[in-house]
Image (tube, rainbow, N blue to C red):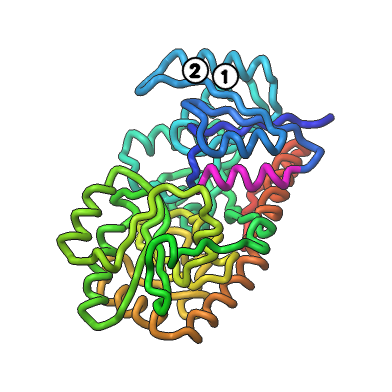
Amino acid sequence: MIARVVHIIDRLPPDGAERLLCEILRYRSSGFEYEVLCLVEGGEFEKNIRELGVPVTILGKKPGVDISMLWRLWRWLRHKQPQVVHTHLFTADTWGRLAARLALVPQVYSTVHSVNSWQKWPHRIVDKMLAKVTTSLVACTTLVAEKLINKDGISDKRVITLANGVDLERFENISPVDLKSEFSLNPSLPVMAVLGRLEPVKGQSYLLNCLAELRDRGVAAQCLFIGDGPDLEALRQDVTRLKLDETVCFTGFRRDVPQMLAAIDVLVIPSKWEGLPMALLEAMALGKTVVAHHVGGIPDVIRNQKEGLLVEPGNQDAMVSALADVLRSDALRSEYGSAALARVQKHYSAEALSRAYEDLYRQTQSGCLGSRRGKE
């Protein structure tokens, strides 16, 4: 019998968890029948998932505590009768797991995509209670797994670690964007980029201060801020205040992120916290140098001075020095980029992750899943 799997998620914008869902669905096997259920709305990746032949349903959750959502979700699940429900992100984790158990779904999983440092005690209580009715929590990094067990008090028997993966085939033979022409960049200088939603947790304001100090040290630089978000206007003001108009360019939201990444020289990840960023894996799949904060699952993937450079969060002097090192040396960027590509090819493919998810579903069905911890 073909098992039916429903992935439940809040919405489908072009962000990391949503991109990961697209990637693993691309490599699904014929032994499972998949559907995606969006609690709030669709988004950019809705079309991508439908083009893969996977149905997408949108329930249209109202803002706040929408009690009717639980009824609608329970009724939908009772009609579909999936063998597996797999949830992603806090809203879907909360409503999805509760409704799945009320609908008597045999297997319920939740992927934890980051350490979720934003959570307050009410969120942690909800997660801990729902963990008791979850077949397994899938942590995307060892750090996330340790946080779930040691800080959130979730039994290690319910936690496994499966690292995120990237669709390596998608990054073969990519034609890079002509960034230097489109954004009037200096063709003689390497191009840095920071990719992601413009919001405080991503550390873009901190990076601007680093870029100003880099300039003051006499290191010429240019950096693209790829993405959009609530901090855009504040960041523009910071650029003006720091006199970085010739250094920084805001590209806005882009649908051609792989082509953008293919054209840069250095990806900077100045985030305050992360899980395992898809942008990191994508840049590595393109053989790019990465300079990042030592947070979340990033150190699981990038080993300092091997596949890139890692800096302790908030250490502006160390970040500036790291950026200066890679900007000044073509050979160093080539060395780190080659090592990054080899590492992601060996350990972090979306195809391997998709197979690992399906193995998890099968093993639980057959009663073979014990206290298993995934390894890199």
The disc placed on residue 70 is 2
Q: Is residue 21 magenta?
A: yes
Amino acid at dot 1: Leu
Q: Disc 1 and disc 2: Cα gap in Å?
A: 10 Å
Classify 268 as above or below 87: below
20 vs 225, nearest the viewer? 225
Q: Which residue is mark 1?
A: 102
Q: Do labels 1 and 2 touch, CB within 8 Å? A: yes
- Secondary structure beneath label 2: helix
Q: Give the x, y percent position of residue 343.
A: 61, 70
Instruction: Please tell me in which quadrant of the rendered image residue 118 appears.
Output: top left
Name which of mark 1 and mark 2 comes first in the sequence.
2
Classify 290 as above or below 29: below
Q: Which residues are magenta?
A: 16-28
Instruction: Please tell me in which quadrant of the rendered image residue 172 appears.
Output: bottom right
Q: Is residue 359 left or right of residue 256?
A: right
- Residue at horizontal 30 percent and vertical 58 percent from the top: 204
Q: Give the x, y percent position of residue 319.
A: 32, 73
Q: Is residue 278 magenta?
A: no
Q: Give the x, y percent position of residue 45.
A: 56, 39
Specify whether residue 157 is in view: no
In which quadrant is the C terminus drawn?
bottom right
Tell me how many marks there are.
Answer: 2
Q: Is residue 304 left or right of residue 134?
A: left
